[in-house]
Structure formats: structure tokens, C-alpha cells
Amino acid sequence: MKVSAQARRSFSSSQKDEIASPSDLQFESPLKIVKYPDPILRANNKRIGTFDENLKKLVDEMFDIMYKTDGIGLSAPQVGMNVRLMVFNSAGERGVGEEIVLINPKIYKYFRKKVLFEEGCLSFPGIYANVERPESVKVVAQDITGSKFTANLSGLSARVFQHEFDHLQGTLFFDRMTEEVLDGIRAELEALEKKYEEMTGSPSPEKVESCVRNRVVAGFGRS
Ligand SMILES: CSCC[C@H](NC=O)C(=O)N[C@@H](C)C(=O)N[C@@H](CO)C(=O)O
Ligand SMILES: [Fe+2]
């Protein structure tokens, strides 16, 4: 039976709120970036309930690989960890700008104004294309100690936050592209699918050519 990407993300509320166990937070150094179409990028991401030294080490290593790979944001599933954690620094350079860590983030307000921006994703090396998103969002999250905070984000910070938040929902940037924009990167996505098949010896778990598109283009404000 074929299960659509949308159906795979339609969990019961209990599954959505599942708390990560210590084994879900175990990782090997150095972290590696998970590339499309690895199914890890579409899996459920569990909430984090333990704020300890292991979590701090994971966050440090996520910043390390984000800077090394010229990223400005990174979500835990992109390093093989299916938990609700993201880091970002829109300056993209250690020691410049602000390092932000958001654990169990939620968006509680999307501003109406939407803007187009040419996005790239570390899980899709070298691929850039336009994605429309709200210009500003209000978010609530926990910090590395577990304390709750709220933030008003706009401009590049709002862009990076929403890109990473999508990863925590199993949504990838091409899910939000118009058909026209998607057509411009289709061949590059298919090349990544072929590479995955050659490296794993397994069929690609999803194909941009045949998939019924997960129409999230207009879907802000739904979780
Ligand atoms: C604009 S949201 C991009 C967030 C993304 N995070 C994870 O996938 C990311 O860091 N993408 C990089 C390819 C990126 O945008 N890098 C910057 C700085 O090098 C760029 O302008 O390409
Ligand atoms: Fe990404």
C-alpha cells in the first residue's frame, strides 16, 4: 500500500507529543548531514524532555557542522536525530551574529504579509529556488536549559526559523514551491534520488517525478 507524505505526517495527537527517550538523543561524532531523499527527513520528530550535558553537546556539534557546511540554520533531523530541535545563526559565521537554539518550538502567529526568497537547504546541496513564506512570525520555544521564551522574528531570522520548523514537521522546501519553480529544479532532485539509489541499493523512498504533491504551498498556520 502506498502512503502519501501527507498521510505519513498525519499523526494522532499522542504520537505528535511523544517525548524522546535517551536512545533517541544518542549520536555519533562527527555529525553528518542527511541528504534528500533519506526517509529520516520525513519521519516524526519527538519532543525533547531532558535538558542535560548530552543535549548541550549535540547543540555544539550541530553548530560545528552548520558552519562547516556554510549553513545559516540546521534542524536535528538533518543530522539524523528525529527530535524537535533547531539551531541557527543568520550571520552564518562563528563569533558573528547571534547563535539561537530552539527546542520544542511552536509558531503561534504568522503575519499576513508573505515574501519570496531564494532558499537553499543543506540536505539538497547546491539547489536554490524561490519559496514564499510569511515575512514575520511569533514563536514560543524552550532554550537549552528548558526555560520557555517567546520571540518575534522577521526578515532572514523568520525565513531561517520557518525553513527549520518545516524540517521538524517533515516538510521540505520543495513542498512549498509552485509547480513552475519546482520544474526548474526537478532534474536536480531526480539526480539526488538516483544517487541515493546507487548508494543504498534501495529504491528512492519518494520521487519528485511521480509524487502527488504535498500541497503545503498555502498551508501556513496548520500543524
Ligand atoms: C534561507 S533558509 C536556509 C536554511 C538552511 N538550513 C538548513 O538546511 C541553510 O542553511 N541553507 C544554506 C544552503 C544557506 O542558505 N547558506 C547560505 C550561506 O552560505 C547561502 O546564502 O547559501
Ligand atoms: Fe533545509
Image (spheres, grey):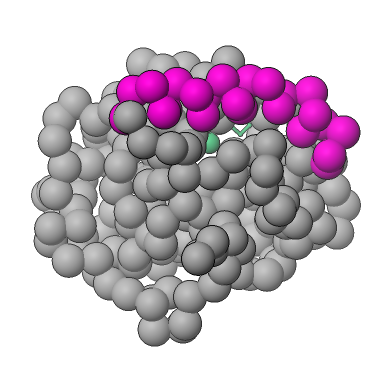
When the figure is inspected, residue 70 is found, relative to residue 31, above or below; the finding is above
Asked whether residue 148 appears in the rendered view, the answer is yes
Q: Quadrant of the C terminus?
A: bottom right
Residue displayed at 66% across by 48% down: 211
Outermost front residue = 1
**Where is residue 110, by image quadrant?**
bottom right
Does 182 lie within the magenta span?
yes
Q: 191 left or right of 49?
A: right
Magenta span contains residue 181: yes
Magenta stretch, overall SS: helix
| In the depicted structure, whether residue 42 falls above or below residue 117 | below
Q: Residue at x 56, y 20 (%)?
A: 191
Q: Is residue 151 above or below residue 12?
A: above
Residue at x-position 47% and y-position 61%: 105
Q: Position of residue 157 (x, y in %)?
A: 61, 39
Report if residue 97 is visible in the image: no
Where in the image, quadrant-wise, is ligand 1 located? top right
Residue 88 in picture, x, y percent from top left: 47, 37
Q: Nearest the camera: 149 or 78? A: 78
Q: Position of residue 145 (x, y in %)?
A: 26, 59
Q: Could you say where residue 52 lies in the image, as x and y percent from the top left?
A: 14, 56
The total number of labels drawn is 0
Q: Is residue 73 left or right of residue 147?
A: right
Q: Nearer the viewer, residue 4 or 31?
A: 4
Which stretch is magenta?
A: 178-200
